Image (cartoon, coloured by chain):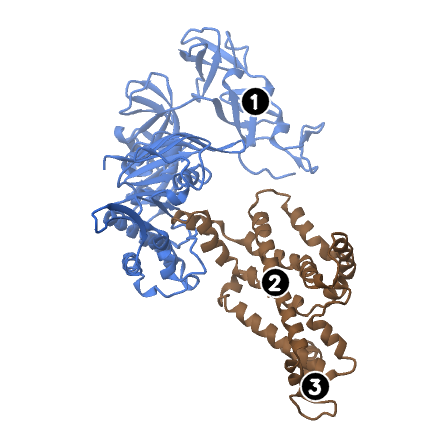
Chain colours: A brown, B blue
Amino acid sequence: MIKLSRKNLVIPYALFLALFVVAPLLVILYLSFTDSNGAFTFGNFAKFFGDPTYITTFLYSLAIAVLTTLLCLLLAYPVAYILARSKWNKKMILVLLFVMPMWINFVLRIAALRELLNLLGLVGQSTGFLKTVIGMVYDFLPFMILPLYTTLIKMDKSVLEAASDLGANNRQVFFKAVVPLSLPGIVSGITMVFMPSMTCYVVSDVLSERTFEVLGNLIERNYMDNWNFASAIAIVLLVIIGIVMLFTYRFEDHDVNARGGGLW
Amino acid sequence: MSEKIIEIKGVSRLYGTTVAVDNIDLYIRKGEFLTLLGPSGCGKTTTLRMIAGFELPSSGQILLNGQDITHLPPYLRPVNTVFQRYALFPHLNVYDNVAFGLKLKKVRVVEEDDRGNRYERFVRLTRDEIDEKVERALMMVDLEEFEGRDVTTLSGGQQQRVAIARAIVNEPEILLLDEPLGALDLKMRKEMQLELKAMHDKLGITFIYVTHDQEEALTMSDTIVVMKDGTIQQIGTPKDIYNEPANAFVADFIGESNIFSGTMVDKFKVRFAGANFACVDDFAKNEKVDVVIRPEDIYVVEEGKGAVDGRVVSSVFKGVHYEMVVMVGKNEFTVQDTQEFAVGRTGSLIVKPEDIHIMKKEFEENVYDGMITKRNTVRFAEGEFECDLTQLMPGSRLDEEGYLIDAEGKKYDLTDVPVKVTVGLKDIEIIDNETDGQAAGQIVSIIYKGDHYQVIIRTPEEEEDFVCDTEYTWNEFDRVSVKISPEHIKMRLTGEVEPL
């Protein structure tokens, strides 16, 4: 009989990870480097990088994700800052109001947004990019607000007082103390927004009524008849996200997570 | 040590309706080490924060070198603060923490161009200047090897040193310290006290220090400001504060003391604990006073040879001296003497006249030690008074047999339970007859207080006093009695009572 020691408790998780994370990853990696007959090839990647339409789609996706993340950060920071600093004791209600849309079905929400944007006159093929960005920002804003809010509300106010005491005016306190101290929240927020906005294709599908394609669409279109090509695109996406995450983590020094605020 | 660097004029600070600082006036001289001392909630930290600029006074004025800085934001004030829990920047290393203020600083330089036009501009410090200043500040706190260290990896004491270096590197005119040693262990604290004191001497700038630790205040300060409930109780040198406390609160807060209620019986003669003592303070005859005596100023000698005899009830060896508790009647004297008197022995107490500190007592109410009788009345000051026992426990009531039932239904027999009784000055009725009232005594003093007389009636045996405000005039030495209606007798339990 297996003894129920602390060491053995890891077994179910290890099995889960092996079965649902490592194995599928290996399968995708294998598929991306083989053709339909199972022979090793770089062809899938060559096909992707050799075709300007694919590259355009890829660049559009990247641009959407970067723009969405930036807009979310710019919109969410002031909101989170004001909420965290306000002495109003019912501020949780406001936080809730910003987060509440997340509780409503995603597809329904996007469909409603489509009607709203149509009503505002945003119709036609040329508006696909703009509408996708609007939709993504609308959707992912709460994921940016929450980690920022938790970091800012936990921030030691005496540190900010110390900055002001040492000669920093309000602007300098903000940029030299508040922003660096909220970096864990910023990194979490960027991670939470960038990753889904790089891969999500429902937003662009619904809002542009399938006239505008992102990388997700490309995978969706291909995985039925060309597993190998779809896998290759997925690997490209994975590498890109990996690079961006590495880049953001560089900002975060090793002990920051110990202070809390980071959701990752 | 003459110029006033800070002047606080009539400053109050309110939070909603609570008053944190209540109309204080204070000035601080250039170069002095001033300590704001008091228990938590006395307004000392709020006062410091108003000097730093983190809080604005609700009313009043703060002057720095004669200029009004009441509403100046913190970053424009030439003061720096060492915070209670250091408040270091966790994202910066030791060097950058210390250099934080220097990097923001702009200094005025006057330059002359080729045509001889002089103009001034503000320039930031150069890298080398900053390096040099940071190095010097870190040297001052013995942390020169730690420049590159992450502040989160430092011990409490080291973090404290970084916080001090970060403040002094800016060469402030005033250094504010908000209980900076509170988080350190005792040994470290003692060490830092001496270091701070040495640093003050070396830097020559003004230190304003906040603490609730009286020993810390006595060790380091040039001037101590004792605060309580948002008001200043006393300002003085450590010696003054210790030797001549202004009132019973200060005496109690600074060091150990025996505090008794006494009465002036003659010029330079005070009566307390059932005996007359010679003293050096002159108060009006029959004035009620607080008498404060430090334990080390009382000597125990052979029975009958001192001013008053008492029985030693406890004795603890404290190293240099014995700390003994001597009971004189109902009064407890704490005595520190190098000579031990064994527990149970009767000795006699001697106090030098100059060691008896007498403070005027502001009478607000009469306070007595009383005892509940089996008839559910209360006995104090040689009298028995009807009273409302249910006030001793919230939500309680009396049952038919006279037992007290509390809110949870528990039953108590209060017979012989000690209580603290307070009676307002206006709530005592004087009766012109020795036998008609509830307690009898002799009028020992009548003072006219503008719109009423304050009459003191003393009981014959226990020498308890009834202080009464009355609009009628009475004659001194008259024998009278007093009556107090039950609703005016306020009582609280002095100890725990077990349910039946």
**Badge 1 sits on which subunit?**
B
The answer to whether mark 2 and mark 3 are in CB contact below 8 A is no
Q: Which mark is residue B489?
A: 1
Crowding at dot 3, Cα within 10 Å, few <14 / some 14-19 / many 20+, comes out as many
Q: Report which residue position mark 3 lands on.
A: A31
Q: Separation of disc 3 and disc 1 at Cα?
A: 93 Å
Residue type at mark 3 is: Leu
**Badge 2 sits on which subunit?**
A
Q: Nearer the viewer, residue B362 or B473?
A: B362
Disc 1 is placed on an element classified as: loop
**In this orientation, does residue B298 appear?**
no
Picture quadrant where residue B404 is located: top right
Q: Residue at x 56, y 30 (%)?
A: B492
Quadrant containing the N terminus of chain B is: top left
Q: Nearer the viewer, residue A146 or B43?
A: A146
Answer left or right for B25 relative to B408: left
Q: Separation of disc 2 and disc 3 at Cα?
A: 32 Å
Q: Residue B223 placed where, x, y %? A: 30, 38
**Badge 3 sits on which subunit?**
A
Picture quadrant where residue A206 is located: bottom right
Mark whose residue sits in front, 2 or 3:
2
Residue type at mark 1 is: Ile
Disc 3 is placed on an element classified as: helix
Mark whose residue sits in front, 1 or 2:
2
Picture quadrant where residue B344 is located: top left
**In this orientation, does residue A239 appear?**
yes
Q: Which mark is residue A67?
A: 2
Q: Residue B327 placed where, x, y %? A: 40, 34
